[in-house]
Image (cartoon, rainbow, N blue to C red):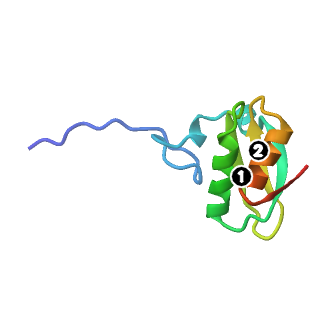
Amino acid sequence: MQTPSRTELPLTSSGSGCGCCSTNSRETPAEKTAGVEYAVEGLTCGGCVATVEKAVTAIDGVDTATVELVPGGLSRLIVSGPAGTSEIRDAVISAGYSLTK
């Protein structure tokens, strides 16, 4: 019985996930830094992060919303898209957290 041939896939750097399904491996440095940054208070866990990201991405005009969690401190919310600060602030407040800029 012969083993089927395999195709070698390129490896990605550690921490960015596997090469076949990691979205990080497809991003350019400009895509990672694009967007407006906000400081968010009150986030303590991954559930908080998911709640804020879901609330903000639901806004018309938001392309992406990513939170970098700092438990007990000011977490960083990065939003790309043409949505305004007031809409983003309202979404964060309605999710139960406070936004500082």
Query: Which residue is painted at 91% across and 49% down in the image?
Result: 101
Q: Earlier in the sequence, mark 2 or mark 1?
A: 1
Residue 31 lies, in percent from the top left, at 71, 33
Using the rendered view, name the quadrant where residue 8 is placed. Answer: top left
The N terminus lies in quadrant:
top left
Q: State yes or no: discs 2 and 1 in contact (Cβ < 8 Å).
A: yes
Query: Which residue is painted at 78% across and 54% down in the image?
Result: 93
Q: Is 58 situated above or below 46?
A: above
Label 2 Cα neighbours within 10 Å, binned few <14 / some 14-19 / many ≥20: some
Residue furthest to the right in view is 101
Secondary element type, mark 1: strand
Q: Of the numbered discs in the image, which one, if any, rests on residue 21?
A: none
Q: Nearer the viewer, residue 16 or 40?
A: 40
User: Dot 1 corresponds to which residue?
Assistant: 67
Residue 91 lies, in percent from the top left, at 74, 47
Q: Nearer the viewer, residue 44 or 18?
A: 44
User: Dot 2 corresponds to which residue?
Assistant: 78
Q: Nearer the viewer, residue 2 or 56?
A: 56
Query: Which residue is painted at 85% across and 39% down in the image?
Result: 85
Q: Is residue 99 left or right of residue 55?
A: right
Q: Nearer the viewer, residue 13 or 17?
A: 17
Q: Is residue 53 left or right of residue 99?
A: left
Residue 14 lies, in percent from the top left, at 57, 53
Q: Is 65 situated above or below 70?
A: above
Residue 44 lies, in percent from the top left, at 71, 68
The three-letter code of the residue at mark 1 reads Val
The three-letter code of the residue at mark 2 reads Ile
Residue furthest to the left in view is 1
Whole-angstrom CA distance, mark 2 to mark 1, is 6 Å
Query: Which residue is painted at 78% across and 33% down in the image?
Result: 83
